[in-house]
Image (tube, rainbow, N blue to C red):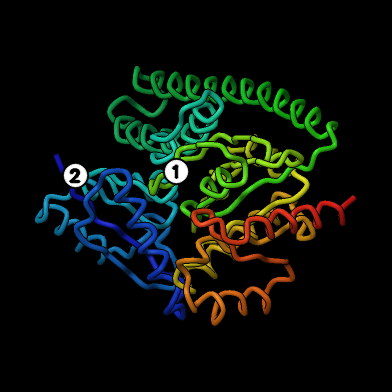
């Protein structure tokens, strides 16, 4: 049975006329990936967020009427909601409300196969839901309090504290388990580095072709899919010509919440431990989307401590990019980023030997 949904976006950058439609289209794609049918987009432009509702009260009232009239079951909000905003919107709309963080989390959870990924995702969900539980149950207690007297403690309040303690204990346990797994992973990374073999990590946004490139460089046969975020756990394999370890790891997305990124510390450790980081870019993307993705990924790499001198850009799907590659993509990179690049195709094998040569050159320069 189809679940009908509205996509909602609050535009606070009132002078942005080019990037927000791209962000909206990417978000719609993610919403569709969790099985929702997007009936319509609801866009509001205002310079600041409403503290309790995100959108202005008038727009929320319009949304309430449309949700009822069009039998909408889910409202997916591009912006990341505060717990009180989510609670108030759900109360007013009478349907489920999820934000960008939760949409991406649902996709991750669908693709998770290994214990590490599942634990990291559980932690991300618990940390997101904990403040919402506090708000939702706290608001319920406020409504019940007058009937019990100001200083009384009823069963609802005990249940409230019990629920919070339960979630808090689970967060502590999951963190402990992940800390142990992270120590084990760091130990493996140190052992791998002692071998003296270059370690090369492939990073980039989802669907850039990272896994296809990983397969082409190593001879591996990892699943390749158009679904977003099919790679959650890092995979390691030697190159077809032994002498390099390649690591394929989690893909990024526009607007990926920093709190969600921080939940994947083991993946970030794999990136930090690599000698060379190959930033895989979909060269066939529209130039505005390509620029936004490139800016976002480099920003994340800066935040987790990946120095620019370790970076190489692989313009994948060069066979599909056509004239745009020379006319728009490479001039933009050369103007804005002091990073060496090579145009490749994981499917046709175009320039893969040049990429391997550039990796070895970069590794030698770092010694």
Q: Please, is residue 363 above or below residue 164 in the view?
A: below
User: Element at badge 1?
Assistant: loop
Q: Residue 303: image x %, image y %?
A: 69, 53
- Observer able to see residue 255: no
Spot occupied by residue 74 in the image (x, y as percentages of width and height): 24, 47
Bin the neighbour count of mark 1 within 10 Å (Cα to Cα): few under 14, some 14-19, many 20 and up. some
Name the one closer to the observer, 170 or 311: 311
Please name the residue shown 72% across and 66% down the image: 340
Q: Of all residues shown, which one is farthest toward the right? A: 367
Name the residue carrying label 2.
Answer: 3
Q: Marks 1 and 2, how far apart in space? A: 27 Å
Quarter placement of the N terminus: top left
- Label 2 SS: strand
Relative to residue 2, is residue 126 depicted above or below?
above
What residue did someone put label 1 on?
A: 224
Q: Residue at x 34, y 22 (%)?
A: 156
Tell me where residue 286 appears, x and y as whole percent.
44, 71
- Is 210 or 319 nearer to us in this picture? 319
Query: Reading the chain from its start, which is encountered first: label 1 or label 2?
Result: 2
Callout 2 crowding tier (Cα within 10 Å): few <14, some 14–19, many ≥20 = few
What x and y, as percent, mark residue 366? Answer: 86, 53
């Amino acid at each position: 049975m189809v679940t009908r949904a509205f996509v909602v976006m609050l535009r606070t950058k009132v002078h942005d006329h080019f990037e927000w439609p791209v962000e909206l289209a990417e978000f719609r794609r993610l919403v569709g990936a969790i099985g929702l049918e997007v009936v319509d987009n609801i866009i509001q432009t205002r310079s600041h967020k409403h503290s309790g509702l995100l959108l202005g009260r008038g727009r929320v009232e319009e949304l309430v009427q449309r949700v009822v009239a069009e039998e909408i079951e889910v409202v997916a909000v591009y912006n990341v909601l505060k717990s009180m905003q989510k609670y108030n919107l759900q109360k007013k709309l009478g349907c489920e409300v999820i934000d960008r963080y939760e949409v991406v989390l649902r996709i991750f959870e669908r693709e998770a196969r290994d214990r590490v990924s599942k634990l990291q995702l559980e932690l991300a969900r618990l940390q997101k839901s904990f403040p919402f539980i506090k708000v939702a149950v706290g608001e319920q207690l406020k409504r019940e309090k007058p009937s019990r007297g100001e200083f009384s403690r009823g069963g609802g309040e005990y249940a409230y504290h019990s629920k919070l303690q339960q979630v808090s204990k689970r967060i502590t346990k999951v963190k402990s388990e992940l800390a142990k797994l992270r120590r084990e992973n760091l130990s493996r990374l140190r052992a791998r580095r002692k071998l003296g073999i270059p370690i090369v990590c492939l990073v980039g946004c989802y669907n850039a072709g990272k896994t296809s490139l990983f397969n082409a460089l190593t001879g591996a046969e990892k699943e390749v899919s158009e679904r977003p975020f099919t790679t959650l756990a890092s995979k390691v394999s030697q190159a077809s010509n032994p002498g390099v370890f390649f690591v394929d790891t989690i893909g990024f997305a526009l607007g990926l919440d920093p709190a969600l990124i921080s939940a994947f510390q083991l993946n970030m450790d794999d990136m930090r431990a690599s000698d060379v980081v190959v930033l895989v870019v979909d060269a066939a993307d529209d130039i505005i989307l390509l620029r936004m993705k490139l800016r976002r990924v480099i920003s994340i790499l800066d935040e987790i401590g990946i120095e620019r001198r370790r970076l190489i850009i692989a313009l994948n799907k060069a066979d599909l990019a056509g004239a745009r590659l020379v006319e728009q993509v490479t001039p933009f990179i050369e103007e804005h980023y002091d990073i060496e690049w090579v145009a490749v195709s994981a499917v046709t094998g175009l320039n893969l030997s040049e990429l391997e040569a550039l990796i070895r050159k970069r590794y030698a320069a770092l010694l």
